[in-house]
Image: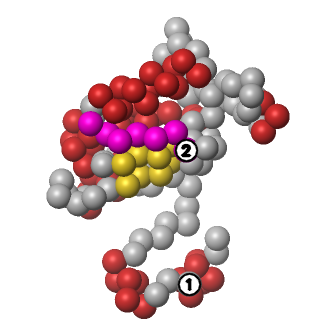
C-alpha cells in the first residue's frame, strides 16, 4: 500500500502510536529492517505482542521463526505468533506452494514438509509462545 492512502485511513487518535513501514523486512537480527530487532527495541515484557509473519518468502521467514525459537529474550516478548509457512504440501501445490528457495539457515538434513512444520510449531508452544499456523 502507498503511504499517503494508508495514513488517510488511520484515525487521528492513534497516529502518534502507530507504526507503518513500507519496506521489505530482513531476517538478520541486527538488520535495519528486521522485525526481530524492532520488537526487541520497543517491546517490554508487560506489553502484549502479537506477531504475524506472512511474506511468502521462506528464505526470510524461516530464519525469523528459528530466531523466535532460540532467543530467550524474544520468547519473553512475543505472546502470539501467527505464521503462514509455505512448506512442501501436495494439497497446496495448486496454490503456488510448489518450488521456493530454501533459506541457508535451514538444516540440510531436514525437509520442509508437514511433519517439520508441525514440530516447529510444537517447539514454539513448548517454549511458551502461542504459535498458530496462519492459512
Position above or below: 128 against 15: above
**CB of mark 2 within 8 Å of CB of mark 1?**
no
Q: Neighbour class for label 2 at 10 Å: few (<14), some, many (≥20)?
A: few
Query: x%, y% of residue 118?
Result: 49, 25
Q: Position of residue 88 (x, y in %)?
A: 67, 24
Can you tell which mark lies on residue 116?
A: none
- In the rendered image, residue 58, in percent from the top left (x then y), is placed at 59, 35
Quarter of the picture holding the C terminus: top right
- What color scheme is it? secondary structure
Near-viewer residue (104 or 113): 113
N-term mark: 2 or 1: 1
Tell me the residue at 45%/55% (across/down): 33
Q: Which residue is mark 2?
A: 134
Mark 1 sits on what residue? 9
Residue 98 part of the magenta-drawn span: no
Is residue 61 among what the camera can see? no
Cα separation between marks 2 and 1: 25 Å
Label 1, residues with CA under 10 Å away: few <14, some 14-19, many ≥20: few
Quadrant position of residue 102:
top right
Q: Quadrant of residue 111?
A: top right
Position of residue 107 relative to residue 37, above or below, is above
- The segment highlighted magenta reads 128-134
Location of residue 123 in the rendering, given as x and y in whole percent from the top left corner:
36, 26
Task: Report the quarter where the N terminus lies.
Answer: bottom right
Amino acid at each position: 500500500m502507498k503511504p499517503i492512502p494508508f495514513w488517510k485511513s488511520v484515525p487521528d487518535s492513534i497516529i502518534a502510536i502507530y507504526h507503518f513501514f513500507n519496506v521489505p523486512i530482513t531476517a538478520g537480527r541486527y538488520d535495519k529492517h528486521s522485525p526481530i530487532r524492532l520488537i526487541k527495541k520497543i517491546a517490554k515484557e508487560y506489553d502484549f505482542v502479537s506477531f504475524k509473519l506472512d511474506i511468502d518468502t521462506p528464505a526470510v521467514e524461516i530464519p525469523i521463526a528459528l530466531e523466535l525459537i532460540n532467543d530467550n529474550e524474544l520468547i519473553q516478548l512475543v505472546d502470539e505468533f501467527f505464521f503462514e509457512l509455505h512448506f512442501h504440501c501436495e494439497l497446496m501445490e495448486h496454490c503456488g506452494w510448489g518450488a521456493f528457495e530454501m533459506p541457508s539457515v535451514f538444516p540440510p538434513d531436514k525437509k520442509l514438509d508437514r511433519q517439520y512444520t508441525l514440530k516447529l510449531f510444537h517447539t514454539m508452544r513448548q517454549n511458551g509462545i502461542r504459535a498458530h499456523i496462519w492459512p
